[in-house]
Image: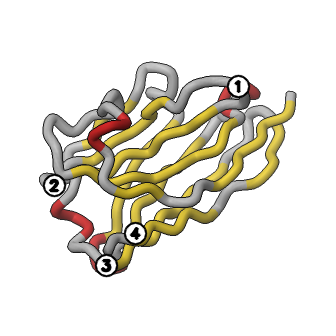
Amino acid sequence: QAQLVESGGGSVQAGGSLRLSCAASGITYNRYCRVWFRQPPGKEREGVASIDTSGRTKLADSVKGRFTISQDNAKYTLYLQMNSLKPEDTAMYYCATSRYAPCYPGLSLNLVDAWGQGTQVTVSS
């Protein structure tokens, strides 16, 4: 059974950076679509970045030019590098895996097979 554990969240000022990590176990991680989602307070969960089984990445328009998704297959770890953070980036961030295609940030929540527990990111102005 897949287990996903996020880390790296915290509180930063606007313009700062954070790197989130998502360590996977129980699955062959790079055989799945992997997506970073976030859920701002009082809002719906939304996808921000994805990486498919070929390593192709996609970013939501709201984070293009600021966020980068990457992976370390040897460590079964997914990363989200977040630069130039804005207060509107404040959210709980989750990593997720899916067997389904296409793999993109807008993947339906119903198609997610496994979720991490989330890590909180707070950006102050």
Residue beneath label 3, please? 26
Mark found first going from the N terminus, 3 or 1: 3
Question: Of residues 28 and 111, which is closer to you in this image?
Answer: 111
Of tags 2 and 1, which is closer to the observer? 1
The residue type indicated by label 4 comes to Thr
Against 11, is 30 above or below? below
Residue beneath label 1, please? 42
Against 8, is 26 above or below? below
For the point 65% across and 51% down, which residue is it? Answer: 18
Q: Is residue 32 left or right of residue 125?
A: left
Residue beneath label 2, please? 53
The quarter of the displayed image where residue 87 is located: top right
Residue beneath label 4, please? 77
- Point out which mark residue 34 bears: none
**Callout 2: 10 Å neighbours few (<14), some, many (20+)?**
some
Against 60, is 112 above or below? below
Rendered-image quadrant of the N terminus = bottom left
Provide residue 95's location: percent of width, then percent of height.
45, 53
Q: Is residue 16 left or right of residue 61?
A: right
Cα distance between the residues tagged 4 and 2: 14 Å
